Image (spheres, helix red, strand yellow):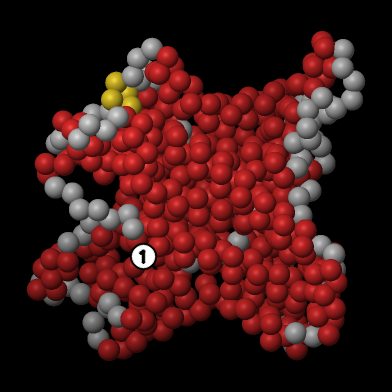
Amino acid sequence: MPFRAQLLVRVFTLSVAVLLAWPVLTVLSSWLQFTPESSSILAEMARTVLPDYLGTTLWLCALVSLGVISMGTVSAAAVTLFDFPGRRTLEWALLLPLAMPAYVVAYAYTDFLQFSGPLQTWMRSNWHLEGRVLPDVRSVWGAACVFTLALYPYVYLLARTALAERANHLMEAARLLGASMPRRILRVALPLARPAIAAGTALALMETLADFGVSSYFGIQTFTAGIYKAWLVMDSRTAAAQLATLLLVVVVGLLALEQRAQSRLRFASTRADRVSAESHPSRLSGWAAVAALVLCALPVLFGFVLPVAFMLRALVLGTEWADLPWARFGQWALTSLSLGLTTAVLAVGIAVLLASYARLQPSRMSRLVMRWVGLGYAVPGAVIVVGLLLPVGWLQAAWPNSGIGFWLTATVLGLVWAYLVRFVAVALQSVQSGYSRLSPSLDDSARMLGVSGLRLVARVHGPLLRKPAAAAALLVLVDVMKELPATLVLRPFNTDTLAVMAYQLARDERLGEAALPALALVLVGLLPVILLSRTLRRQ
């Protein structure tokens, strides 16, 4: 590649990295803007609400950790180590809760379990009870249950993969040494899956910390809710940015834990291991088979089947079919789809350029750029919003007639920028996975034939990366359509998406109308789940 072309590619790569890192850098630089006003607000929050934010967030994370570890590990061990009726169906069905946004699960269970819901109404009328019969679902324990049901597939997926790849031959060796089945599970299988369990738990906790829909709908005082209150209620951008910094530190710690756990997911295996006699799961019968079936069916029932049924009930019985906002629903769906497609195309294009740059010009700078861009998915939407809007205020104060605020808040430019900060990492991971399957000899052969640089990427890599790029576009499209915090704040006027309207209608207790966009999001979320389940079955 000519020197000028190399320089242009390097400048473009650095520019993209700076744009994607800008919100995080802005949040970190907020401590340089430490004013007496922000100091007094932080001091007041430290005396009043900050301990509540911290305690509630830590307690919620502890409950979610316990829930996802228990549910994900038990189901992964059951479908991997044992054979029972319905196991093959449950292998992919256990992934279905990934299609359910956590806030949709919260809407569904709140409508069914609240004081005026059908369950408590039936219990009072048939059992002659008065007052509240069940605990209030809008609480920390209710949010923990919602997050557990929506996020346990992270632990299930990673633990199942680890057990399927590494546990069988060691389980056979333990059996030959006289170990009983419970001892083999506790002393052999679970220690092998421990790094995968830790990685899945870290991913679930990052999603919990990034959530705004559940915590806001349930009225829980978490760090994310505190960031929005500091910004919108107390009108202190600096205080919101400093709270976002504290949240970012926790997320970085979880990310380091996840990466450390992933680095330990490497074990040597031989051909003899893969064809061992105990490569097949142990056959269960009788009550043991029934217990395994129930343990694996309950997460699917409570995490997908019942929420969908509750939302369908609210859709059918909550309002007249003709009164549903069909015209506005079409506009919401079109807006969500257009934003998703725009972001998906841009994210895949950036991911291909970054991944090809790292492959063709491997260096310390390219590795640093890839790692920095890859961190974007771990950054909560609230942090990105603060990081984008904070410099807008500074620039508007310095140059009132610049129009920067208009372009970032009155158009979709700021919204798409926030999406790219979060979801380029999703596309990059898929494209890098595709690149890992391309032999370096292909590049050498192309160079011998006179094809190099961008022509090599377009004529050789491009056709071979079509499937990974399509998968990346699908994942980004679905993630953008389900994104709530960034969309809620950065969307222009009269630009509503399915996620935003589902949240607003549910907040106004119009669950019959909220069910329509919520179920549409579930249908869209099924697409990557089907793709993932097909991939796992092929493997």
Residue 281 visible to the viewer? yes
Quadrant (top left, top right, bottom left, bottom right) of the C terminus = top left
Identify the residue at image location x=12%, y=44%.
271
Q: Percent position (x, y) of residue 369?
A: 41, 75
In terms of depth relative to the viewer, which is nearer, 410 or 149? 149
In terms of depth relative to the viewer, which is nearer, 91 or 535? 91
Q: Percent position (x, y) of residue 204?
A: 53, 50
Identify the residue at image location x=65%, y=70%.
246
Where residue 348 sits, quadrant-wise, is bottom left
Q: Percent position (x, y) of residue 32?
A: 69, 86
Quadrant (top left, top right, bottom left, bottom right) of the N terminus = bottom left
Q: Is residue 51 left or right of residue 359?
A: right
Helix, strand or loop at label 1? It is helix
Q: Is residue 115 left or right of residue 198?
A: right
Q: Is residue 403 left or right of residue 428?
A: right
Among all residues in the image, which is located at the extreme front?
Answer: 178
Residue 491 visible to the viewer? no
In terms of depth relative to the viewer, which is nearer, 203 or 332? 203
Does residue 381 sit above or below 467 in this rendering? below
For label 1, the residue is 352
Identify the residue at image location x=78%, y=32%.
135
